[in-house]
Amino acid sequence: MMDFEGCGRVAIMGGGSWATAIAKIVMNHEESINWYIRRDDRIAEFKELGHNPAYLTGVHFDISRIHFSSDINAVVKNSDTLIFVTPSPYLKSHLKKLKTNLKDKLVVTAIKGIVPDDNLVISRYFQQTYKVPEDQVASIGGPSHAEEVALDRLCYLTVGCRDLERAQLVADILASRNVTTSISTDIEGIEYASVLKNVYAIAAGICHGLKYGDNFLAVLNSNALQEMARFIDTAVPCDRQIINSVYMGDLLVTTYSNFSRNRVFGTMIGKGYSVKTAQLEMEMIAEGYYGTKCMMQLNKRYKVYMPILESVYNILYAKAKPEQEIKRLSETFR
C-alpha cells in the first residue's frame, strides 16, 4: 500500500506537447520532478535550451528542478506518482523496458487514447497487465489543449479515480490560478469519452474539409454526444451527467478547435488526402485514427448504435469515399 504523504515524488512519463504542459502545471506545486524522456539527445537539448526542443518551445523551465532520465526503470524506482503522457500507440513499446514493480505507485494516465490490439482503456491496461490496484490508478480528462495551457489560458481538468481521496491528491498538484480541477469516480467513463471525442473530431474535420458548414457541425456534435452517451452508459453504467465538461466540453473543444490534431487530420481527409499521406504530413499523432479501429472492435461486444463511429471507420479503414459516406451519415441525423 502507498504510505507516502500527498503524491510523493512525481514523475512525468513522456516528452510530447501534453507531457510538457502537464509538467508546467505540476511544477507550480512541486519543488522538483522526475521526467522520463526516451531520447538522450532530446534531454541534452532540453537542458541546454531550458525548454522542450520539439514541443511548446515557448514554455521555459527551471532545469535545476528537473531530474531527467531516459531510463524508465530508474524514473519509476525513484518516483511515487507516475503521470503517463505518451501517445497510446507507443505506450506498450515504452513499457516493454519496464522491470520495476508498479504495485506501490500511484499511476495517473493523461493519455487520451486506447491501447491498440488489447482494446483496453489505459487504466484497465495498467490494472490487468501490471497488477496496479484499482484504487491506485487515476485518469486526467477534460477540455485541455496543451497549447492553451502553455499560453496560461483557463483550463478545466477532471481527475477520475475509484478512491476520491487519491483523486483529490492528484487534483491538488494540478490546480492553479489558470487550472480548475474537479474529481470523479468515473475513471473509465472519462477515458472512453477521451477516446471517442477524437473519433468525432476526425468526423468534424472531414466535414470541414468537404465544406459542410457550422449548422451541420452543430448537428454532428449533438448526435456525437448522444452516441458517446449510449456507448459509455452501456460499457460503464453509472450515474453521470454527459453534459459535464469532462465529457461534452472535451468533445466540443476537440471538434471545433484548430489546435485539435484529430480535426486537422480529418480536414486533410475531407480535402482529398489519402490516410497515409495525411499521417505523413501530420507532425503529431492523431490518436483518433487508432481509437476508431479499437472502438469498432470493442463495439462488437456491446452492439451500441454508433453511426458516426462506423462512418469514420469506413472512411479510414474501408476506403469509403468521404463525400458519399458523410452524405449517407447526414441522412440519419435529425
Image (tube, rainbow, N blue to C red):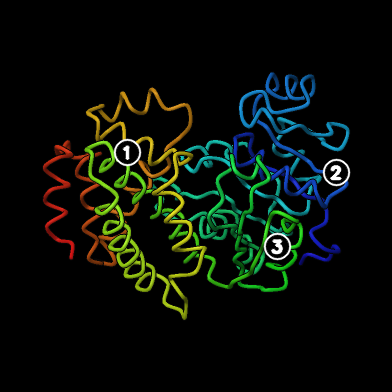
Answer left or right for 239 relative to 100.
Answer: left
| In the displayed structure image, the side of residue 199 where residue 38 appears, left or right | right
Hey, what amino acid is under mark 2? Ser
Residue 168 found in image quarter: bottom right
Distance between the alpha carbons at the discs numbered 1 and 2:
39 Å
Could you tell me residue 20's position as x and y percent? 66, 38
Label 1 with label 3: CB-CB less than 8 Å: no
Q: Earlier in the sequence, mark 1 or mark 3?
A: 3
The kind of residue on which mark 1 rests is Gly
User: Would you name the residue on which mark 1 appears?
Assistant: 266
Report the front residue among 112 and 208.
Answer: 208
Asked if labels 3 and 2 touch by Cβ distance under 8 angstroms, the answer is no
Q: Dot 2 corresponds to which residue?
A: 32
Q: 10 Å neighbourhood of mark 3: few (<14), some, or many (≥20)?
A: many
100 versus 250 height, above or below:
above
* N-term-proximal mark, 1 vs 2: 2
What residue sits right under mark 3 in the picture?
Answer: 171
- Percent across and percent down for residue 290 are 37, 43
